[in-house]
Amino acid sequence: MKKLLMGVFIFLLVLSCKDDKKEKYLPNSVGAINTLSVVIDNDMWKGQVGDSIRKYFAAAVDGLPWEEPLFSIHQMPPEVFTDFARNSRNVLIVQKDSSVIAGVKENLFAKPQQVGIIKAPTQEQIMDKVAEKAPEIIETFKKNDIRESQERFTRSLNKETALEEELGISLTMPSIYKIAKQEENFFWIERQIRKGTMNILVYEMPLNSIPDDSTRVDAIIKMRDSIGEKYVPGREEGMYMITEKAYAPYVFDKEIAGRDAIETKGMWEVKNFAMAGPFINYIIEDKPNDRLLVIEGFTFAPSTNKRDYMFELEAVLKTIEFTDTNTDLAKATTKK
């Protein structure tokens, strides 16, 4: 029995070492953020199966002024999916097969990499599996790109410490982001881009100021508009940032930094002036500090696609860490 157990142990150890070696020698994945390689034969891609894939993986991103797809898709037939083509960070493989397979594999050909696999005997079954598994696969791809974006931030980090000193939080962001305004418990962080700016707002609110009922959306809009009036002015008196009235924002329950949060995506505009753009807002329930911590990203980039800008802002906001859970901090900053 001892010899048998020892043999099993050695077998498992060797198997583990082989897996470690495979992982170690995988090439680095490549590709722009929000891109997806779809491996499928040309006939299926041009037909109903391709339509089904595009319906989900090229769906319009919520909260943008015009339609932009979740992923920029690059299709290739299986015979082309070799060598360097296998190193894409996000891959979806769709094939006819005698068995039904639908799921996600990690680091099959490169790292970090997520590979969605959907196989079935008929096109109808493939489309059924695409519809069933698309939300899970999309979420996996998105998290993979968020991690990749955050990894890229570390190449040149913003080292300003005011957020930690004043609000007890940290954000990991590139050094190109700079604090443009600091007033009481309000921070405005800005990044210059070719045709405009990318912006982050950080501030505190009383813990129970957003109700958990049917009036929640109205309360969020009122909060944003009051902050805009106080801290984000327009060019002339009476002009300031508000939530655009023509579009209802998208609101979701989330978890950020281990705390309950509300995610809001929508459009902002400047009152009495033709200026607008998309925003993403997180209201985080920070009970240890007896407050709501609000972080928001918004972009001003006229006549320019904004998907990738907003994705970068989302990646920055999701790096938030609470570095001080002393309620005295919250009480002191609230009184400033």
Image: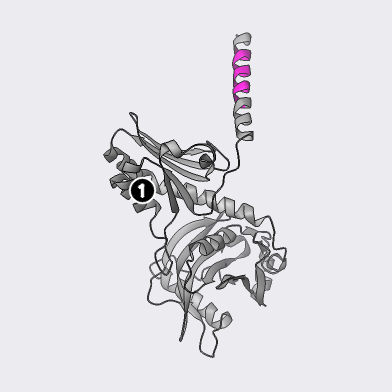
Point out residue 74 in the picture as x, y percentages from the top left corner. Answer: 44, 49
- Residue extent of the magenta highlight: 5-16
Point out residue 115 in the picture as x, y percentages from the top left corner. Answer: 48, 41
Residue drawn at point x = 60 percent, y = 18 percent: 11
Residue drawn at point x = 53 percent, y = 48 percent: 144
> In the rendered view, how is the structure colored?
one colour
Q: Choose between 323 and 79: the one closer to the eye.
A: 79
Q: Choose between 147 and 215: the one closer to the eye.
A: 147
Q: Amino acid at mark 1?
A: Ile
Residue drawn at point x = 54 percent, y = 78 percent: 227
Q: Is residue 169 above or below residue 126?
A: below
Looking at the rendered structure, the number of numbered marks drawn on it comes to 1
Point out residue 313 in the picture as x, y percentages from the top left corner. Answer: 56, 63
Q: Choose between 321 and 60: the one closer to the eye.
A: 60
Point out residue 171 in the picture as x, y percentages from the top left corner. Answer: 64, 61
Q: Secondary structure at mark 1?
A: helix
- Residue tagged 1: 53
Query: Does residue 26 appear left or right of residue 310 in this picture?
Result: right
Q: Is residue 231 above or below residue 164?
A: below
User: As drawn, which residue projects farthest toward the front?
Assistant: 80
Q: Quadrant of the C terminus?
A: bottom right
User: As drawn, which residue projects farthest toward the bottom?
Assistant: 237
Circle 1: is it few (<14), some (14-19), or many (20+) Cα within 10 Å?
Answer: many
Query: Does residue 109 appear left or right of residue 20 in this picture?
Result: left
Q: Main secondary structure of the magenta part?
A: helix
